[in-house]
Each structure stands twice: as C-alpha cells, then as structure tokens.
Amino acid sequence: MTNPLPSEASINKLVGHKFPGGSYTIAHWENFLLTECTGAEPLPDNLAHPVALFHVPILGAGTSIAEMFSLGQAEPGASIRIESYDWEFYKPLQEERPYDVSGVITSAERRQGRKRTFDRIQFQFDLHDEESDDPVARTIVTWLYRRSTQ
C-alpha cells in the first residue's frame, strides 16, 4: 500500500519556510575527523575542510535531515535523490570560530518525470562570521522527493 500523494499546494507552500537559525562552531576534533575521512592532510592556519558544509549549515540553522524529510513529506521506502549541493565560499571556514547560520526554503515545486512524479525542494543556508557579520559561505541544497503514484 502506498501513501497518498501530498497535495501540490502543500509542497508549494513550503517556499519561504525559515528554519530557527543559530550558531555553529567547527571544533578542532570535528575538523580533524572530517579531514581524515577524506584522506586529506590537515589544512594550515586552523582552516576547516570544506566538506563541513554538508552538515554545519543544517545543524547550525536549527534543523536536521529528519526535519527536511518531514517538511517535504518524504514517503517511507521511497527515495530522496540529491540533485545538487552548490557551495559558495566568501571566506575560508575556520575551526573554533562561531558562525551565525540561517536557512530558508527557496523553491518547492511538483514535477513530472518520464516515469514518476517528484517534488523538487531547494534549501538555502547562509553562514556569517559571528563577530564581524561578514558572509562566509552559502550552500544551496536541492533534493528530489520521489513519489509513488497510484
């Protein structure tokens, strides 16, 4: 048995949804483990590995992968596909430096593929230096929520 298809209107209404926001500091140990996992050498001058942008914006904005699944009404057993993760760096990420993080859903729309229906939802997360308020990075995450059709 499949779940009912979420209404297109409920998906479209997600545009403009703001996450609570918050602060995130990349700890030295966290950066060490992330860097080690990539097989890279530690970066000089307390620079954080860019791969931190996979999780720092989500956690710093006060949300989670589970909430992002829930907002898009992900179906149990149906896959969510990644369309893209676009990263813009205005300044290098650093360890032990607090970042203010905000997040918003910028796009949410129903699409019909050749074989199935899916909802395309785009999340934008912005990191600012907590001391100077200068922009540090932006990440735009686009997921495709595959839908079962009856």
Image: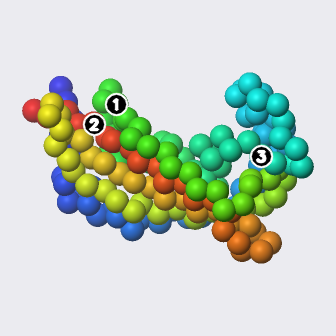
Residue type at the position of mark 1: Ser
State how far apart marks 1 and 3 are (Cα): 31 Å
Whether pointer 2 and pointer 1 mark residues with C-beta atoms closer than 8 Å, the reply is: yes
Q: Residues within 10 Å of mark 3 (few under 14, many from 20)?
A: many
For the point 72% across and 60% down, which residue is it? 91
Q: Position of residue 8 (x, y in %)?
A: 19, 54
Which of the marked residues, 1 or 3, is nearer the chain's N terminus?
Answer: 3
Secondary-structure class at tag 1: loop
Tell which circle, 2 or 3, labels the residue nearer the N-terminal end.
3
The residue type indicated by label 2 comes to Arg
Q: Which mark is residue 48?
A: 3
Q: Which residue position holds label 2?
A: 146
Q: Quadrant of the C terminus?
A: top left
Q: How is the image coloured?
A: rainbow
> In the image, which is nearer the foreground, mark 2 or mark 3?
3
Label 3 sits on a secondary structure element that is loop
Q: Is residue 11 visible?
A: yes
The residue where tag 1 is placed is: 79
Give the percent coordinates (x, y) of residue 90. Answer: 66, 62
Q: Is residue 148 left or right of residue 65?
A: left
Quadrant of res 107: bottom left
Q: CA distance from mark 2 to mark 3?
A: 34 Å
Tell me which numbered mark, 2 or 1, is placed earlier along the sequence: 1
Closer-to-camera residue (44/148): 44
Residue 70 seen in the figure:
no
In percent of width and height, residue 9 lies at 20, 60
Pinpoint residue 68: horizontal percent, then vertical percent.
Answer: 44, 48
Q: Residue at x 49, y 54 (%)?
A: 140
Q: Residue at x 20, y 47 (%)?
A: 111
